[in-house]
Image (spheres, helix red, strand yellow):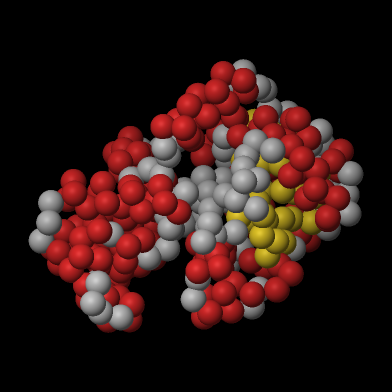
Amino acid sequence: MKKLLITDLDNTLYDWVSFYAQSFSSMLDELVRILDVPREQLIEEFRQVHIKHGNSEYPFSALELRTVEDRYGHLSRKEVVNKLDTAFHAFNSTRKKTLKCYDGVFETLARLKEDGVIIVGHTEAPVRNAIFRLKSLGLLEFMKHLYTPKDRYYDDLDSQTKSWVDSYGEFIYLIDEDEKKPNPRLLEEICLREGFQTSDAMYIGDSIVKDISMANDAGVDSVYAEYGRQHDKKYWDVLVSITHWTDEDVKREGLLKELYGHIKPTYRIKSFDELLNVIRL
């Protein structure tokens, strides 16, 4: 039986594509109403903000939209937030309805922890978003640590936000932004930090190119979460329209697919609860 489970978060523990696309669309609809500008214009402005921060779900990205800055630049941040309050409420309301664990996640993690398996999370999602989701879903109690990237402009964050992140203490291990998947050295370091050999660990994720290839190269048993790739096209199209990927990122992704697209996982599962069987082998 494996002693350490390293789990991806988005599209492995919950359907990130579905909940985020729906939540973002609700916010966008309300912003179109508030600002009275074309939807396509705001989508492009969001994309530019996301490129700046290197992530397609940068918290409060609406505050940095060109239209918002032009119209409300003379106001304080608090005043701008109040102006856009109904848009943020629309996002939060939809998120509350759509952010759900995949079937079997809660029960499986509880059983693994009961069996003495150490569970840690690893994600490229912004630290604030990752923590919020884990807490909202009741998954924090199962994890010993969370490995997540530092904000690109971390030093520019307000003191309240930094204090909130710091309040989680050693639970959070901030990774340099450049430490992107697939990086086998990163998994080796996680195993070392947790006190295990790579042969004692298992990694589960939804991407062959990034998750599975990384685990295989690190000597960690890999589990491909097939269910995490079953996205509704209409939600996927929303994410594509606001992607933070630059032309350079697209080229990098294409190269990764050429290099690792043929990689085979140690195991494949069609639902999260199947993890119980493979981790005990």
The N terminus: image quadrant: top right
Residue at image position (60%, 51%) is 177
Relative to residue 89, is residue 61 depicted above or below? above
Q: Nearer the viewer, residue 110 or 85?
A: 85
Q: Position of residue 161 (x, y in %)?
A: 52, 75
Q: Is residue 259 visible?
A: yes
Extreme-left residue of the structure: 36
Which residue is pictured at 79% across the width and 56% down the height? 118
Is 63 on the left-hand or right-hand side of 215? Answer: left
Residue 270 makes an appearance in the image: no
What residue is shown at x 62% (from left), y 20% (from top)? 259
Q: Nearer the viewer, residue 190 or 74?
A: 74
Quarter assignment of residue 237: top left
| Side of 167 relative to 161 (left or right) | right
Left or right relative to 243: residue 70: left
Looking at the rendering, which quadrant does residue 197 occupy?
top right
* Quarter location, residue 273: top right
